[in-house]
Amino acid sequence: MSSGNVIAALQVALPADRIRLGAEIGERHHTDWTRMDPQCPRALLLPRATEEVSTMLRICHAYGQPVVPQGGLTGLVGGAHPQAQEVALSLERMNAIGEVDCSGGTITVEAGAILENVQQAALAADFVCGLDIGARGSCTLGGNIATNAGGNHVVRYGMARDNVLGLEVVLADGSIVSSLNKMIKNNSGYDLKHLFIGSEGTLGVITRAVLKLHPQSRSTQCALLALPGLDAALQVLRQAKAHLGGGLSAFEVMWPSFYHFVTRLPGVDSPLSGDHGLYLLLEAQGSDEAQDAERFEQLLSGWLEQGLLEDAALAQSVEDRKRFWHLRDAVAEFPVFLPKRSTFDVSFPLDGMAQAIAQIEHKAEANWPGCTRLYFGHLGDNNLHIVIDVPGTQGAYAESIEELVYDCVGALQGAVSAEHGIGRKKRQHLGRSRSLEEITLMHTLKRALDPLGILNPGKVL
Ligand SMILES: Cc1cc2nc3c(=O)[nH]c(=O)nc-3n(C[C@H](O)[C@H](O)[C@H](O)COP(=O)(O)OP(=O)(O)OC[C@H]3O[C@@H](n4cnc5c(N)ncnc54)[C@H](O)[C@@H]3O)c2cc1C
C-alpha cells in the first residue's frame, strides 16, 4: 500500500483527538533536548491506551509508514527526533500510575508517566524508586527504559534495566506482547524484556512496565571530599563498597577544572578551600541515623589517616547536602555559559580512566591551546562526562573534537555511550565500541522484530 493514504486510514480507525497534523503539532515534538535540526513530523499520534498504540502501529505497518516513539523528549542523542516524512507517536497521554504492590515491592505504570510522579507514588507507599536522573520532572518512564537510563544512584540501585521486572510492548506490526512479570525469579524461557530495554524505540513501543521498588532509607550521609588524585579515588571507591555495602548511593567525581569552573558560577560556592587533585561527592544511605553517621565518619577519618583525603566537608543538614549537590548539578547551567560546547557521555574501564584523560588532555591542548576541558562523572559506574569548548570558535571544531574523544574511547576499549544511548547523534561511532559480529546480530534482531524497518529508522544502527 502507498503511504499516501496512511493518515486517512488512521483518521478512520481512531477518535479525532488522537491525531494532529501540521500547525496543530506543538514545536516541542519537532526535536528533543539536543535541539538538533527541528522537523515537523507528518503527523503526531497521541494514544490513550495500549490497544490504540496497537491500532496505530498495525496501520503504519500496513502502509510502510515510519514511526518515531516519543516520551518526554529529554533525550540527549536525538533518539526521538523526527524526520518530516515520519509519524511521531507520543506516549504522553498514557501516564497512569497503577498498582503499588506493597508485599512484593513493585509498581505498575504506563510508559508516559513522568519519572518524578513515579518516584512520588513510590515514596507515598514507603518505598523508593531506584531510578533518578536530572531530567526527572520531564522524562517519562518509557523513555527511561527505552534508553536504559542511568543517573546518580546507579552505584546503589543499578541502571533502568536492573529496576524493570516486566514490560508490555507493542511490536512494529501492532501485536501486543504483555509480559508484566512481578517476580524476581522467572527463568521461564528467554527474558524478552531485555530486548526492549535500551533499544531506543527501534524494536517496539513500550506501553507499560512493572518496576522493582526498594525500601526507603532512614538516613543519608553526605560529604564533599578533596583527594590527591584518581588513584586515591579508586582506593576510596573500593573501601566504600566494602564498608558501606549496598549503602553507597553516590560516588560523583569532579576533576579540578570542573570544580573550579562551577564554583565560579553565580550562586555556587565552594565548601572546600585550596587546590586539590580531585573532588568527590560521596553519599551513603542506611537505616539507622546514629550508627550510619558514626560508621561514615570513621571511614572518612581512616581515609584522612591513610592520606587518601586532603580535606573533607561533612554535610550537617539537608541544606548542606543540597549545597553539595547544587555544585555537581551546576552542569545544568552549561548551555548558558558554554553554549557551543561539545559534550560527551562515555565509559572507560577504571584501570584505563587516567590514561584516557591524559590522552584527551594532551591532544586537546595540542590542537586547541587553552581550550576549556571539564571532566566529571559517576566514577563508580565507569562513567565519564567530558565537556570541551574552544572559546570564540562557535563550535567550529565540533567534528574534530568528536573524532579526538571517540578515537580515544575506541583505543581504550571504552563505550561511546555510557547512559544516554546512541540515537541519531552517535550512530556513526557505534562501531568503535561494538564488534562487527555484535552489530550484525543487532541487525538480525531488528529484521526479526521490525522487518519493514518502520520503527525509529536512522537511530542506533
Ligand atoms: C537535564 C538532563 C539530565 C539528564 N540526566 C541523565 C542521567 O543522569 N542519566 C541518563 O541516563 N540520562 C540522562 N538524561 C537523558 C534523558 O533524560 C534520558 O535519556 C531519558 O531516559 C529520556 O527519557 P524521555 O522520556 O525524555 O525520552 P525521549 O527523549 O522522548 O526518547 C528517548 C528515546 O527513547 C525512545 N522512546 C521514548 N519513549 C518510548 C517508549 N514508550 N517506547 C519505546 N521507545 C521510546 C525514543 O524513540 C528515543 O529513542 C538527562 C537529560 C537531561 C535533559
Image: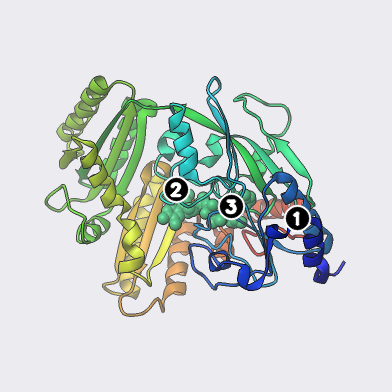
> In the rendered structure, which amino acid carries the disc numbered 1?
Met
Find residue 444 and report its horizontal and vertical position in percent. Answer: 75, 52
Check disc 2 and report its element: helix, strand or loop: loop
- Is 21 located above or below residue 195 in the figure? below
* Of the two numbered discs 3 and 2 in the rendering, the one whose residue sits closer to the viewer: 3
Q: Is residue 177 left or right of residue 345?
A: right
Residue beneath disc 1: 56
> In the rendered structure, which amino acid carries the disc numbered 3?
Glu
Does mark 1's beta carbon lie closer than 8 Å to ligand 1? Answer: no
Q: Is residue 306 left or right of residue 43?
A: left
**Viewer-closest of 425 and 332:** 332
Residue beneath disc 2: 136
Does residue 413 show up?
Answer: no
Classify residue 241 by image quadrant: top left
Dots 3, 1 in contact, CB < 8 A: no
Does residue 106 show up?
Answer: yes
Distance CA(mark 2)–CA(mark 1): 28 Å
Residue beneath disc 3: 92
Find residue 14 and report its horizontal and vertical position in percent. Answer: 76, 56
Q: Which mark is residue 307?
A: none
Q: Please name the residue shown 24% across and 45% down the image.
A: 324
**Viewer-closest of 88 and 269:** 88
> In the rendered structure, which amino acid carries the disc numbered 2?
Arg
Find residue 376 and report its horizontal and vertical position in percent. Answer: 33, 53
